[in-house]
Amino acid sequence: MGTNDHAYKLLFSHAKMVEELLRGFVHEDWVEQVDFSTLEKCNASYVTDDLRERHDDVIWRVQLRNQWLYVYLLIEFQSEVDRLMGIRIMTYLGLLYQDLSRTGEVRPGGLFPPVLPIVLYNGRPRWTAPTDVAELIAPGPGKLRDYLPRLRYLLIEEGAVPPASLAARNLVASLFALERCRTPRQIKETLEHLIHWWREPEQTGLRRSFTVWIGRVLLPGKVPGHQFPEFQELQEVPPMLEETVKEWVQEWKAQGLAEGRAEGRAEGLAEGLAKVLAKSREIARLLLQRGDPPEEVARITGLSLEEVRAIAQRPCHLADEATPYQATPPDGKKPEQL
């Protein structure tokens, strides 16, 4: 299991996340009849006939009317769609029912509890595998089709969730929204909304798990090669992201000046500064597209307010063309435009 899988398993080891998942993404009337105060996490390791153990699934049970409902959550982070997921789910549920019988949870002659199997998938390719195991089996002639096993699972595909749904006041929706963010600025804004309404003291443990996931999985994945500090609270993350954007601009400037000095001539210095300006304008354009005010963009990038406003009015096909930077060397001779 990879780091991302472990982090998600940690998040969905909190009852609040399971409640938010059911409330926000299971669109069935019976969800309103669930007593979420009864949520209990169950053992998710079963020994199969070949003595291999499973530890990567999350199983909860909750009271629905006068019976238990089991929620079997399988978190899938594969780069390719698993066409045989239906068969995997059928196998896992068979092991679950077998375990409930062996441990006495279901008395002899009694009925087994209903199970809601959920596959949470956040891979890049769209999910194309059948969600009913019957679609994987040839029906055969005559009445053979009557004996086909039937088992469906609920697919929650992060990449297919409409953007409007991600704006809902829901912790799982916020998780999906954070994964869709492309820049530190977007992550910062999403976190600020999350922190603003998520202040319940009983959720301290879940906030800590979110903080761990952000610091160890989300940010390293979004900004490869950047070293992030260890966070203790979510409130520490937005200010750090603000500083990260500033650091990028400063690093670009320092890199451009260093390249110019290394060239040892005015043309090299001008070329380095031109690269700095091009990168500053690029990030300014991205921030403006996000709706940031020109004054804030100017403060972050170091560009003048007039230039930021000019970038905002510039057509997209011209925005990538950087205005050449002209530097005057010590001898007073101006280099040619780059």
Image (spheres, grey):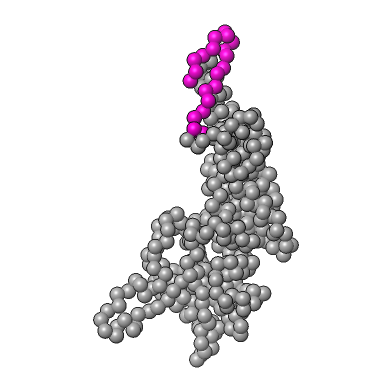
| Most distant residue in the bottom direction | 109
Residue at 52% from the left image edge and 80% from the top image edge: 114
> Above or below — where is 110 with respect to 117?
below
Q: Residue 65 lies in what quarter of the image? A: bottom right
Q: Is residue 307 left or right of residue 146?
A: right
| Most distant residue in the top direction | 331
Residue 63 location (% of width, % of height): 61, 79
Q: Closer to the camera, 337 or 51?
A: 337
Residue 323 location (% of width, % of height): 53, 25
> Above or below — where is 279 with respect to 330?
below
Q: Residue 204 lies in what quarter of the image? A: bottom right
Residue 201 location (% of width, % of height): 74, 62
Q: Closer to the camera, 249 or 57?
A: 249
Residue at 67% from the left image edge and 61% from the top image edge: 205
Residue at 55% from the left image edge and 18% from the top image edge: 326
Do we see residue 89 in this rendering? yes
> Above or below — where is 317 with respect to 240?
above
Do we see residue 91 in this rendering? no
Could you tell me what secondary structure mostly forms the magenta stretch? loop
Residue at 53% from the left image edge and 20% from the top image edge: 270
| Magenta region includes residue 28 | no
| Most distant residue in the left direction | 141
> Above or below — where is 144 with respect to 192?
below
| Magenta region includes residue 336 | yes
Q: How many labels sit on residues?
A: 0
Residue 174 location (% of width, % of height): 60, 57
Part of the protein shown in magenta: 318-338
